[in-house]
């Protein structure tokens, strides 16, 4: 079974700062639908004296059944996000992966990666909600079963 996905382009902005401790800043400012094939080079969308916006096409946002809980957590917020993991390479920021899973984004952050969230395009929310409804099964609140080694143990009589 093929994973559901959308092809996206990531918009990253480079700003020049008037600050003696930090000369510039890279930030993800958007994710948009895109039909470009993988490997399409980045292009400049906008440029002025203080900032440049780059369009990085050819990325994919795939949905995976084992990430359904992360999608559910993302959808439970007032504004669902798309998370972009990026790295600085050769003096420029480059996106490496795109996800809608809160858990996957958190794992990348815990691993020391740069991850930024941007508001999810509204037309993607029903698509993600349908996937979660089909694949997310919350854990039940059953009482934990004690292992046999604990059965009959009387800890208060010591």
Image (tube, rainbow, N blue to C red):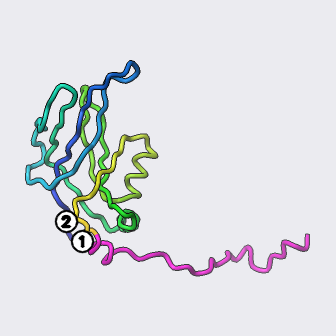
Quarter of the view holding residue 13: top left
Q: Position of residue 73 (x, y in %)?
A: 41, 65
Residue assigned mark 2: 123
Measure how far apart labels 2 and 1 are at the Cα level.
7 Å
Is 37 placed above or below 26 here? below
Tell whether label 1 touches label 2 (CB within 8 Å). Answer: yes
Q: Residue at x 68, y 76 (%)?
A: 146
Residue 137 is a magenta residue = yes
The x and y percentages for residue 102 are: 39, 58
Return the residue nearer the eye: 148 or 142.
Answer: 142
Q: Is residue 38 above or below residue 153?
A: above
Q: Residues within 10 Å of mark 2 (few under 14, many from 20)?
A: few
Residue at 39% in and 47% down: 108
Asked if residue 70 is positioned above or below residue 145 in the image, the reply reads: above
Q: Position of residue 57 (x, y in %)?
A: 14, 46
Q: Which residues are magenta?
A: 129-158
Residue 58 pos. (x, y %): 14, 48
Quadrant of the image containing the C terminus = bottom right
Q: Which residue is mark 1?
A: 126
Q: Within 10 Å of the Cα at label 1, are there few (<14), some (14-19), or many (20+) other Cα atoms?
A: few
Q: Residue at x 43, y 40 (%)?
A: 112
Q: Secondary structure at mark 2?
A: helix
Residue at image position (30%, 78%) is 134
Is 143 inside the magenta-drawn segment? yes
Element class at badge 1: helix
Residue 141 relative to residue 7: left or right: right
145 and 29: which is toward the camera: 29
The picture quadrant where one finds residue 20 is top left
Q: Quadrant of the N terminus?
A: bottom left
Which residue is more in the foreground, 67 or 101?
101
Give the camera-side residue of 147 and 132.
Answer: 132
């Amino acid at each position: 079974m093929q994973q559901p996905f959308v092809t996206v382009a990531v918009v990253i902005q480079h700003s020049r700062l008037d600050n003696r401790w930090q000369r510039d800043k890279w930030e993800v400012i958007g994710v948009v639908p895109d039909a470009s094939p993988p490997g399409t080079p980045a292009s400049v969308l906008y440029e002025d004296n203080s900032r440049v916006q780059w369009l990085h096409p050819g990325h994919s946002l795939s949905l995976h059944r084992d990430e359904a809980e992360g999608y559910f957590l993302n959808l439970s917020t007032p504004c669902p996000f798309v998370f972009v993991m990026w790295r600085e390479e050769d003096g420029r920021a480059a996106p490496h992966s795109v996800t809608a899973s809160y858990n996957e984004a958190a794992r990348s952050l815990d691993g020391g990666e740069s991850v930024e969230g941007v508001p999810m395009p509204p037309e993607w929310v029903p698509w993600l909600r349908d996937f979660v409804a089909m694949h997310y099964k919350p854990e039940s609140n059953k009482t934990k079963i004690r292992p046999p080694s604990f059965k009959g143990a009387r800890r208060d009589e010591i």
